[in-house]
């Protein structure tokens, strides 16, 4: 009886000390590792100066992390004997990039703070935010305190990430399955205002789609032939190193590069046509503020907090 009582007392104490569903907060590292955010910004900036596309790659990395069992750094894990990770899943293989930049950030932070307190999942969230800002996009306050997963799943990456051949209703259902809505779908898809895509992801569109500007389609066929050239890349919008609302204006001109992009604007007033018109021409500034809100929403997807997960020492491996 006394043992039970003291157990209950102890359990209550633990429950009080460790919040069950801890909230993410912007000041999470202010006390425990003040140089963390400045380091992420500095290394992200260097990487983008070296290669502007890296900003796009880091933004996409955070998206691919969050859409597979939440923003938990799972996308960074290499395969082990216990699981096949997400790097070889179809949406990521020969496609996802920026892993070396994340490694560089992680080791610089651990050195500067002489401690392993900053999660890989948070590094992805901050590097994505900084990339957007550095390429001319909005500044927003990123919420922190995510912890890292101890596992990853190739299968979950294959089933949870939307492919470029999805139609409008498939894209919307996919986003809704992640707690996101139509506005989030349209606004976050405009992450394609920066970066490149490989021929293999838009070949069917330029040869088979009808909802495409014919000169635009023709201009892509040299570098993306019917066979071969799978890895040849093309900008996702016409101002590929500038984070702006041009993506929407390209859709209105039927110059979306991916089938999934053009699904957001059919030109018949259906689906998200009105939203694309709104962000493209009526209120492009509103895209920037709405993008910030949707990024924060995406970044809050199922984070591991409190005693769940771990702070990985090396972003590619779970701790022993
Ligand atoms: C709506 C569904 C989406 C689909 C179907 C999709 C699909 C794709 C595809 C096929 C590529 C090219 C990959 C390759 O060449 O291998 C790509 C690139 C990219 N995606 Fe998405 N994407 C979607 C949403 C998003 C979201 C929500 C974001 C971020 C907020 C995003 C950010 C990016 C960026 C920045 C790139 C360029 C990466 C680089 O240049 O390294 N995408 N996406
Ligand atoms: C696999 O999981 C077991 C049990 O959690 C652990 O002891 C082992 O170190 C793991 N192996 C690898 C390669 O991570
Ligand atoms: C495309 O690039 C990857 C490496 O990123 C390589 O493994 C693959 O063989 C290349 N494919 C073609 C068709 O050249
Ligand atoms: C979208 O794709 C799904 C699955 O292939 C299909 O059932 C649906 O009819 C399609 N919707 C439209 C509007 O084409
Ligand atoms: C999507 O959710 C946001 C809040 O997260 C809300 O402001 C917006 O109106 C919603 N959009 C739609 C189409 O429901
Ligand atoms: C276009 O559609 C045809 C007929 O459905 C199909 O055989 C072909 O693989 C598709 N893609 C390209 C690039 O032609």
Image: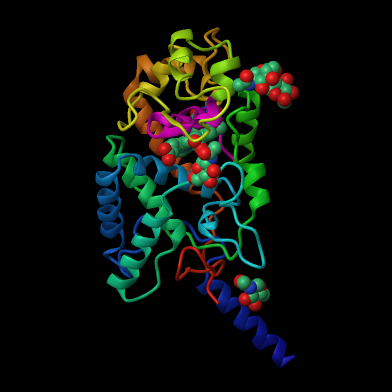
For the image, the number of numbered tags is 0
76 in magenta: no
By secondary structure, the bulk of the magenta-drawn segment is best described as: helix
In the image, 12 versus 72, the foreground residue is 72
Residue under the image location 48 percent in, 23 percent down: 257
- For the question of whether residue 275 can be seen, the reply is yes
The x, y position of residue 195, in whole percent, is: 39, 34
Vertical order, 34 against 142 (above or below): below
Residue furthest toward the right? 1
The x, y position of residue 129, in whole percent, is: 36, 45
Q: Quadrant of the C terminus?
A: bottom right
- For the question of whether residue 95 can be seen, the reply is no
201 in magenta: yes
The x, y position of residue 132, in whole percent, is: 33, 40
Residue under the image location 28 percent in, 53 percent down: 41
Residue under the image location 30 percent in, 72 percent down: 111
In the image, 184 versus 46, the foreground residue is 46
Residue under the image location 56 percent in, 20 percent down: 205
Q: Describe the colour scheme in one phrase.
A: rainbow
What span is in magenta?
179-202
Vertical order, 243 against 51 (above or below): above
The x, y position of residue 146, in whole percent, is: 47, 59
In the image, 83 versus 225, the foreground residue is 225
Task: State which quadrant residue 286 falls in.
Answer: top left
In the image, 220 versus 98, the foreground residue is 220
Residue furthest toward the bottom? 2
For this view, does 299 lie left or right of residue 180?
A: left
For this view, does 174 lie left or right of residue 264?
A: right
Task: State which quadrant residue 309 falls in.
Answer: bottom right
Q: Quadrant of the N terminus?
A: bottom right
């Amino acid at each position: 009886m006394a043992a039970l009582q003291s157990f209950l007392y102890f359990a209550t104490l633990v429950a009080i000390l460790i919040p069950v569903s801890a909230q993410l907060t912007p000041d999470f590292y202010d006390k425990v590792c003040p140089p963390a955010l400045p380091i992420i910004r500095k290394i992200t900036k260097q990487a983008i100066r070296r290669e502007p596309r890296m900003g796009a790659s880091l933004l996409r990395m955070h998206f691919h992390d969050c859409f597979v069992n939440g923003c938990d750094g799972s996308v960074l894990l290499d395969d082990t004997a216990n699981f096949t990770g997400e790097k070889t899943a179809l949406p990521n293989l020969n496609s996802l990039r920026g892993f070396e930049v994340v490694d560089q950030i992680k080791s610089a932070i651990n050195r500067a703070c002489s401690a392993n307190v900053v999660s890989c999942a948070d590094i992805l969230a901050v590097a994505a935010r900084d990339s957007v800002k550095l390429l001319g996009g909005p500044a927003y306050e990123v919420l922190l305190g995510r912890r890292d997963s101890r596992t990853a799943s190739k299968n979950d990456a294959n089933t949870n990430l939307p492919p470029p051949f999805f139609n409008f209703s498939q894209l919307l259902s996919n986003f809704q399955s992640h707690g996101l809505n139509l506005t989030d779908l349209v606004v976050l898809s405009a992450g394609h205002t920066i970066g490149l895509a490989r021929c293999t992801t838009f070949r069917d569109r330029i040869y088979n789609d009808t909802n495409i500007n014919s000169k635009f389609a023709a201009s892509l066929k040299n570098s993306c032939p019917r066979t071969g050239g799978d890895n040849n890349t093309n900008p996702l919008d016409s101002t590929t190193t500038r984070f702006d609302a041009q993506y929407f204006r390209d859709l209105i001109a039927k110059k979306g590069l991916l089938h999934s992009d053009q699904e957001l604007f059919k030109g018949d007033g259906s689906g998200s046509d009105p939203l694309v018109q709104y962000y493209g021409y009526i209120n492009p500034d509103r895209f920037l503020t709405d993008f910030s809100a949707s990024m924060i929403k995406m970044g809050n997807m199922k984070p591991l907090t409190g005693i769940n997960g771990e702070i990985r020492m090396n972003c590619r491996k779970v701790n022993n």
